[in-house]
Amino acid sequence: MVDLSKAGEVHRRNGFAGVEEGRPRVPARRGDAATLRDVARLAGVSVKTVSNVVNGYPHVSEDVRRRVSTAVEQLCYRPNPSARNLRTGRTGTLALVLAPDVPYADRLTQAVVDAAALAGFRVVIVPIDLAGALPVDGVLLCADVVAADVLDAWLGTGTALVLLGVRRDERFDHVAIDHARAARDATDHLVRLGRRRIAAIGARPGEPDTRTAGYRLALSRAGIAPHPGYLRPAWRHRPGEGYRAAMDLFAHDHRPDAVFCYSDRLAIGVLGAAVDAGLRVPDDVAVIGMGEAEEGRFLRPALSTVSVDTSALARAAVTRIAARLGQAPWAVPTGRTLSATTSDPQPAAPVTVTVPHRLLRRESCGGSRCY
């Protein structure tokens, strides 16, 4: 067991504040960081053993690894990234690649920067065509559409790659919400509102999509036969495409009384189309999107949506990169276990991690403004 009396001694010597149970300790003054020796003293092991755990060496007993990990969390110890990079020959930099139509791009960017900083990484944001040319230790790629040859090219680079969002490839780690469940939850919500003519906008032509599966499952469970004209494609998830698809739907002889969009960007266009078609939202047509785009809550009516836990997404993604680089599995504090691996510091097989989502019921479905 970790001797908590020693923790108090080390905290006092290093000027640590914040002793409230269950909350992280933080240095009272910048520069008063805990050292390997502090961690070793608290865990009751040698400095070499702490170094082995910190660097992810596998030949450490689970008991010792747990004691060291607990001491690390108690002391808020963080490895010195400059020293580590000199020793390993790595850059200490991760590349974040975001498609232009990711609705939660701003929130995800900040979450990735925060999670990476905790693990000793810097983050650069780059377009996908430059990501392979930069000297980085890992890439976090968030895009629904990625050409197969782009992913093929990554296999030979030796650079860790994690896919975020809808796009999956069995050769790479993948971190995302359960998109089928999220689509089902959104459609279920419309069904509970009494809507029966529910359209969906966002499927990409010729590509299977788990969101479509979730939408259809919700209709089936409610005993609603899907109308063949209610499922509308959108290659790019942008307001203009949502607007055009919705105007076609609203001109239909049996106009839908609800629209589920695969992205908030599409849903914003649908709201505009409803106004131009002389329809009231949500009285004549309810609208719900996915992604919790920042502008959605400021629309009138405010947009109902499925929110992605971007903090959990970022932590899990950075943890996967750290694991691929052979760092200890506790390198990025998560608050709860998200990673599918806990002890293998460098797993060979790709891992899929599912993070939480939640429904935000706002005015476009008859809810409150919900800031």
Image (cartoon, rainbow, N blue to C red):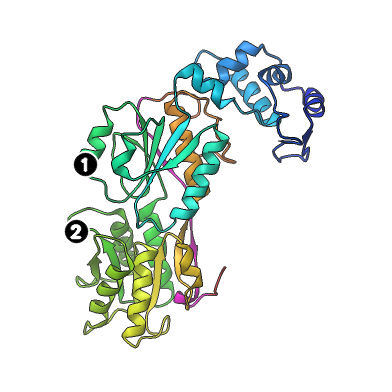
Q: Position of residue 85 (x, y in %)?
A: 50, 22
The mark closer to the camera, 1 or 2, is 1
Q: Quadrant of residue 278?
A: bottom left
Label placed on residue 205: 2
Q: Is residue 214 magenta?
A: no
Q: Secondary structure at mark 2?
A: loop
Ranked by sequence position, the earlier of labels 1 and 2 is 1
Q: Quadrant of residue 264?
A: bottom left
Q: Is residue 177 above or below residue 162?
A: below
Q: Secondary structure at mark 1?
A: helix
Q: Residues within 10 Å of mark 2 (few under 14, many from 20)?
A: few
Q: Quadrant of residue 259?
A: bottom left
Q: Position of residue 351 (x, y in %)?
A: 38, 34
Q: Residues within 10 Å of mark 1 (few under 14, many from 20)?
A: few
Q: Amino acid at mark 2?
A: Pro
Identify the residue shown where x is 51% and y is 41%.
315
Task: Pick whichever, 18 or 203, lies toward us.
Answer: 18
Q: Position of residue 132 (x, y in %)?
A: 31, 35
Q: Is residue 117 above or below residue 196?
A: above
Identify the residue shown where x is 40% and y is 33%.
138
Instruction: Look at mark 1 in the image and give the residue it sits on.
Output: 148
Identify the residue shown where x is 44% and y is 32%.
321
Image position of 288 (left or right of 233): right
- How far apart are the two marked residues, 1 and 2, measured between alpha carbons? 16 Å
Q: Amino acid at mark 1?
A: Ala
Image position of 68 (left or right of 92): right
Does residue 171 appear in the picture of this structure? yes
Q: Position of residue 142 (x, y in %)?
A: 37, 47
Residue sticking out furthest to the left: 206
Identify the residue shown where x is 53% and y is 40%.
115
Numbered range of the magenta stretch: 348-367
